[in-house]
Image (spheres, helix red, strand yellow):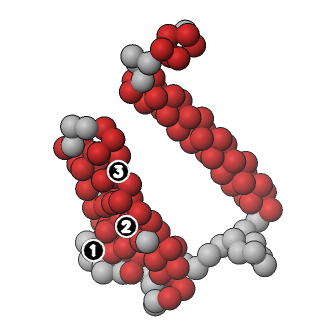
Amino acid sequence: VTGSLWGRPAWGVWWVWDARLTSTLILMFLYIGFISLQSSIEDPRRADRAGAVLALVGVINVPIIYFSVQWWNSLHQGATITAKSFKMAPSMLAAMLILLAACWIYSIAVILVRLRCIIREREREAPWLAEAG
């Protein structure tokens, strides 16, 4: 929605059927479908299995989003950071890399905490959990 708000003055239209925008829209629908599928199945193991199948289908879309700027004529700029060159000021690059590392560390920590909660919730009757305290 916010992209449409700033896209209107930039492109003159509310929506452009650009390859990256369209493939990202498809990914958003896959996320919504994944969340809906997980919450609609009562058995957690069956829900996880069905969600995993849908997630594997969604993974196919990720490289399409990434390479869409190179494969098709796109509104979006190309890669700023490649294996051969950096097209940004060194101070901006350093700040970006530090923030990128911080985001990765935070994301991994949140995933591990959530995974621990899920395991404890599913195995609350298990004897090993009572021993672990």
Foreground label between 1 and 2:
2
Q: Residues within 10 Å of mark 1 (few under 14, many from 20)?
A: some
* Image-quadrant location for residue 53: bottom left
Q: CA distance from mark 1 to mark 2?
A: 25 Å
- Can residue 5 be seen in this snapshot? no
Q: Amino acid at mark 3?
A: Arg
Residue 64 spot, x, y in % from top left: 46, 77
Q: Residue at x 46, y 89 (%)?
A: 72
N-terminal of the pair, mark 3 or mark 2, is 3
Residue for badge 1 = 15
Secondary structure, mark 2, is helix
Q: CA distance from mark 1 to mark 3?
A: 35 Å
Q: CA distance from mark 3 to mark 2?
A: 13 Å
Q: Residue at x 60, y 41 (%)?
A: 108
Say if mark 1 contacts mark 2, CB within 8 Å. no
**Lateral position of residue 10 relative to residue 66, left or right:** left
